[in-house]
Every structure is written in C-alpha cells, then in structure tokens.
Amino acid sequence: MSDQDRIIGTYSGQAPGAKLFFLGGIHGNEPAGVHALARVFAKLHSLQPPFRGSVIGVRGNMAGLAARKRFVDKDLNRLWSEEEIARVRAMSPHARNTEEKELIPLLELIESYLDGSQQPEILIDLHTTSAPGGLFSIVTEDTYNRDLAAALHAPIIFKLTTSLTSTTNIFMENRNIKGLAFESGQHDDPTAVDNHEAAIWLLLEKAGCLEAADIPDFEQYHYRLISASRKLPHYLEVVYRHEITSEDEFHMHPGYQNFHEVYKEEPLGRDREGEVRCPETGLMLMPLYQPQGEEGFFIIQKLDEPPQWD
C-alpha cells in the first residue's frame, strides 16, 4: 500500500502554528485511534474552522490492522530506538519482516512531515489496552509534554520509557519531537473511540491550532475525559515491568484492570515456572489479556506531585 493509503487525513490553515502528527493503530488490534482520527478529519473538512499550523493522521501497522493482530512478526512499537532504526535501514528490503517493512515508510512519513522547519512539532501515539480502565498518558521527562498531557485530564504515567527503550516515546525524545502516548480504554470498548476523539480535539486546542469556540461540543470533550478520570490518581510512576516471552507461557489471572490495587506477594498469574507474584504493593497497569505481548503487567505507584526537571 502507498503512503496515501496510510494517511487518514490532513488539515492546515494559512496562519503559522504547531505541526501535529497523530499515529493510530501502531498495534493492529488497537483500531480505536484510526476510527477517532477519521471522525475528526471528517468534521474539520466539513466545518472548515480557522486553523493555525497543520495536522496529519496516519495508520501505523497496516498489516496488523488488516489482520486484526497486535503484530504479524514483531511488535512495531519496539523498533523505534536509533539502533533499531539503523539496523532495519541497513537491511535489504527483501530481508525485512512484516513490521520492519512497515517501519520504513512510516518513519519516512514522520521525517518528511516533522522536518524541524516549524515549532513546536508534536507526535501523538494513540493506543488502547486489553484490560478495562486504561485511560492515561505516557510521557518522557519533558515539561512541555507533561503540560500537554495535563490538558487531557487523565492520569500521567512517568518512567515507563526507562524500561521500554524502543517505543515511539523514545523516538520523540531522541529526535527532540514533543508529544506523548495516550491510552483511551479497552480495545473493543466503543467509548475508547469517543475518548480518543475528545483527546484529539483537546490537543489541537492546547497546541494552539484551534480556538475552543471553533470546536463544536468542546466542553463536552473536556467533561468526557474529566468524568472518565475522576476517581483516578493524577501522577504515577512505573516501579516494575514484568517482561515475558512466548516460551514463558504466561497467563494473567482474570479480573484485573488498570489502576487495580495490588499487594506484595499477591498471586497475579502463572507461567511455566509456577505462580507469578506481585513484587511490590501498588497499582496494576496494562495486565495482559491478549495472545501477543512482551509484558505481562506493570506495577505503578502514586506520586504526590509530578517530577521536576531542569
């Protein structure tokens, strides 16, 4: 498929402003972001609001989306370190696996759009989770990114990128691109699409591309995300990542959801070695309830205030 097949939509205005690149479906079993972007671009082109800067929405793993699988050969969201990018670029195109073939045109599209000619340049990676309650933002150690995430009213997760070193968040950090990853809910929950749409409009307003008065139902988008996050902590950090391989035969015990309280030594799942117990008291994040994945779960803990960076 061509780049035009990958592009969901574009919109721009005459006035200068931020460049936003929205990425949906980097995991093929997470189409909610793609559907939400299609809604937003349809409304932008119908309403023709005044706009500063430009925005593009793009499909990530097109092969995975077609197969309705997280990935075909390898997780596309584990190929974004500079080392992985250099390795894949050095390969013969015929030797690349499915996701390596997806990476190159996607990377070229990002590089051509976020070319350093305009500031700020922002990349937003839209996700969903296999467990309920997955409404949160993931940011790197950057004040602008933290403030961007705050506009979404959802919990902000810090230090996830210290254990996941080849995701789009790391790519943003390495390339000095602003942005975040946003999780809008469970894969198959229709409200995940609604949450993503709300987040996209709020981010367009926060980045200065649109005035709130030019966004129909703007207050409802605010209320949607505020309401969905009302009982959740504001700031959290990752303290443990349970890394797995297919050979581990890991199975999460049923009944867990994001932000579920867990306690040290609590049985969380099983693998071929036996019971898998919780290493620390905290809250559950992204328990694995799908066939594919490189993490069985994460443990997070609340922060009284966000980290301070120079």
Image (cartoon, rainbow, N blue to C red):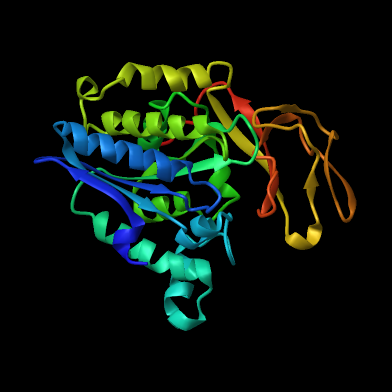
In the picture, the quarter occupied by the N terminus is bottom left
| Residue 238 spot, x, y in % from top left | 62, 38
Whether residue 191 sits left or right of residue 269 in the image: it is left
Please say if 273 is above or below 199.
Answer: below
Q: Which residue appears at 73% of the width and 32% of the height? A: 256
**Residue sitting nearer the eye, 212 or 150:** 212
- Which residue is depicted at the point 41% across and 42% down? 35
Tell me if residue 166 can be seen. no
Residue 155 in the image: state x and y as whole percent: 52, 27
Residue placed at 18% from the left, 41% from the top?
A: 53
Would residue 77 be seen by someone viewing this image from the given angle?
yes
Tally of numbered discs: 0
Q: Position of residue 128 (x, y in %)?
A: 54, 40
Q: Residue at x 34, y 28 (%)?
A: 202
Left or right of residue 12, residue 86 in this image: right
Rendered image quadrant of residue 43? top left
Residue placed most toward the observer, 240 or 244: 244
Q: Position of residue 308 (x, y in %)?
A: 46, 31
In the rendered view of the protein, which quadrant contains the C terminus? top left
Q: In the rendered view, does 24 fall on the left or right side of 10?
A: right
